[in-house]
Image (tube, rainbow, N blue to C red):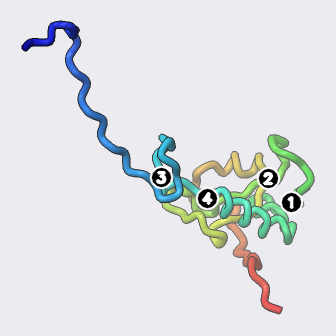
Amino acid sequence: MLDVSHTSASPPTPPRRPQAEHPRSGPRSRRPVSTSQRSTTTRDRHRAAIRRLRPPCALCDADIDYNLRSPHPMSFVVDHIIPLALGGTDELDNKQPAHRVCNERKAAKHPDQTKTRPVPRQFVTTRTW
């Protein structure tokens, strides 16, 4: 016997494909997991390691007031010596302290293209007693 109660003109919807889940995400997580994003924990640790020594700005060699908050032009920011856009790494040895305005002026230029040369600094992140 033919069922005539369902006479809809719209085509049937295709079945949903199951989404691959990240081991730590729940079944309702819709945000794709990306391994290319930078870790905020690593960023905060690097900022703290640089801030701990309170070094001067690596670009203009003037003192940095570490109490100033963003977006003040003379506030502390972390500058990548070789910018990420030019293939630099997001490791501590590729980072240096800078004023916000100095970092914006440098932009994504290679150290050879700027007037100032970065001074190599070593930041202590672990201690042995």
Q: Which is in the foreground here, disc 2 or disc 4?
A: 4
At label 3, the amino acid type is Ser
Residue found 58% across the figure and 54% down from its top: 109
Residue named by callout 1? 62
Question: SS for tag 1?
Answer: loop
Q: Nearer the viewer, residue 101 or 41?
A: 41
What is the C-alpha distance between the residues marked 2 and 4? 22 Å
Where, quadrant-wise, is the C terminus in this rendering?
A: bottom right
* Badge 1 or badge 4: first in the primary sequence: 4
Residue 89 visible in image: yes
Q: Which is in the foreground here, disc 1 or disc 3?
A: 3
At label 1, the amino acid type is Ala
Left or right of 18: which side holds 50? Answer: right
Q: Position of residue 60 (x, y in %)?
A: 79, 58
Residue named by callout 3? 34
Where, quadrant-wise, is the N terminus in this rendering?
A: top left
* Badge 2 or badge 4: first in the primary sequence: 4
Check whether the beta carbons of the residues at disc 1 and disc 3 lie within 8 A of each other.
no
